[in-house]
Amino acid sequence: MGFSGGRTILCIVLLVSPVVSARSQTVADKAATSTISGKVTVGGKGLQGVMVGLVIGDQHSSNLRPTRFKSITDENGNYQITKVPAGTYAVMPASPAYVATEGRKSLIVGKNETVENVDIALELGGAITGKVTDADGNPMIEEMIYVSAVTTSQRAFYFRNIRTDDRGIYRAYGIPPGRYTVAAGSDTNSYIGSRRPGGAHQRTYHPSTIDPAAATVIDVGDGSEATNVDITFAGPARTFTARGRIIDSDTNQPMPNARVGVQIFMQYGTSALGNVTEATKDGEFKVENLAPGKYAIYSEPPANADWHSEAVKFEITDRDVDELVIKTSRGASVSGVVILEGTDDAKVRATLLASRIVGQILDGYLGQSEPSASINPNGTFRMSGLAAGRLAFRLDPREPLRVIRVERDGMVNPRGVDIKEREQVTGVRVVVGQGNGAIRGEIRQPAGLELPVTARIQLIIRRTEDAVPGGYGTPVDPDSRGHFRVDGLLPGSYEIAVTVYIGASARQPSIPTTRQTVVVTSGAVTDVTITLPMPKPAQ
């Protein structure tokens, strides 16, 4: 049953690092034990002595955490991991020169479950080797090497830390087959605002270009080795400085000691660096180590301030930028009450009062981090210093309470509250609920349907009560068996949509989308089985 495609690199450090506890579980969960077993092969033959371990992955990030659940393959390549608590894991082998051919094996394991045939096929990875020198031919010692996949359709990325030796030579190995660029040197953006002395070399790609688009692409095959992939630095990176002042637009007086933040405009969006420096008592600021590019600069107000600033855009080409002026102005405010719905539990109420309500200005507003406010014992709150725009709300921490809806003047505002410049908005009701429901499901294939390993399963779940025009929902990753589980759900009706794509780069679904509706109740797990339809006959 093919529920994951592509290839993945083996994360050895995770498996041999100190034990880290799994996600928090109840006493009953810890007492329950399950077993996971399978076989590790290379070219169809069992591979002995491979450590296979379980790691915990965050669905919304690439972070992985190791666990103590491990096993070593026997002479036939078989492994068995016992006494595994219920949870969501990735099964990963530690074999540095090999890569898995069918992607990471993710599993959602229930209580006292026996999961068999979690087999892992390996193949010998490729290698890239070369030398890094400066413009005079001197070897660059202890220089970090960056091996990056050329296309986003490559599901596996090489992320092992590789540095040059005392001769300036590096060798990256265990690389999944694909197309890569190789670079060395510093990303100058990481030093913005610092007074780091010069001498750092700008990120340079093989053979000697700072333009990623001009980098020579290296083809890596099964067990291949690309040699003489050398990198020559042209010289230390040249950076520039932006100077200016911060003033109050109402009084035209300087804003002393105000914080200065920077955003970088990149090809696919912006990257906010947040506070990088501070203005003087006269409101003057200086931001150093700026590489050529487009930026926005703004002043970030302290908590509970009643002002905000608009971002000032500028571009660095081949010289410093002076006389930037950041203007601050009195902001809008929003006040109201947070209503807990669906429970009168005192502990849940205490959790709410210990949280903060966080606002986010939508529609691409530059120059302000997320404003927040404490929740008073009677549920009231007030946010100030807001820019004009559409304001959405959430709670921090995000779990176990979630915002259900926002009301203003008796009307539900599913997309947030619209705020005008300097408007004082009152009477907002933010209704929250306890997300303690769950959906546990399985995606099944009908008889006669066998998906290839390149098939990609897209599962989207959304609460129908929250649905708005253009709303997308939450993506969920089914495991290698087609099992999935979503926790922290509010009570209500949910639609689950499953779409199958054949091929990593396919954009059109190969099988019609299957939709199913389930009802989630507070504190309960709702089970669901979704059977995929047969593909439509080729026209």
Image (cartoon, grey):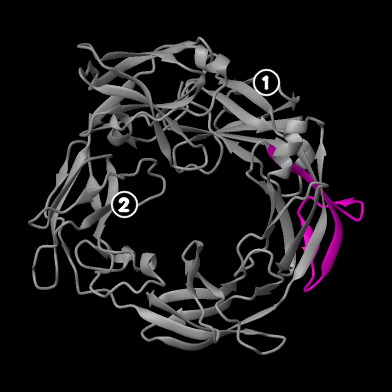
Residue 465 in the magenta stretch? The answer is no
Q: Total marks drawn?
A: 2
Badge 1 amino acid: Val
Relative to 192, is 472 above or below?
Answer: above
Q: Which residue is mark 2?
A: 148
Q: Position of residue 241 (x, y in %)?
A: 40, 81
Q: Which residue is rendered at x = 73% and y = 38% of the image?
A: 350
SS at mark 2 in the image: strand
Q: Which residue is rendered at x = 42% and y = 75% of the image?
A: 293
Q: Gap between marks 2 and 1, in whole Å?
A: 41 Å
Relative to 384, is 255 above or below?
Answer: below
**Residue 446 visible in the shown view:** no
Q: Position of residue 2 (x, y in %)?
A: 45, 25
**Residue 196 visible in the shown view:** yes
Relative to 340, is 284 above or below?
Answer: below
Q: Nearer the viewer, residue 435 or 159?
A: 435
Q: Which residues are magenta?
A: 401-430
Q: Which residue is rendered at x = 15% and y = 54% of the image?
A: 164
SS at mark 1 in the image: strand
Q: Residues within 10 Å of mark 2 (few under 14, many from 20)?
A: some
Q: Nearer the viewer, residue 248 or 75?
A: 248
Whichever of labels 2 and 1 marks the residue nearer the N terminus, that label is 2
- Quarter residue 169 falls in: bottom left
Residue 414 in the magenta stretch? The answer is yes
Q: Which residue is rendered at x = 41% and y = 45% of the image?
A: 153
- Quarter residue 222 falls in: top left
Badge 2 amino acid: Ser
Q: Residues within 10 Å of mark 1 (few under 14, many from 20)?
A: some
Disc sitting over residue 525 in the figure: 1
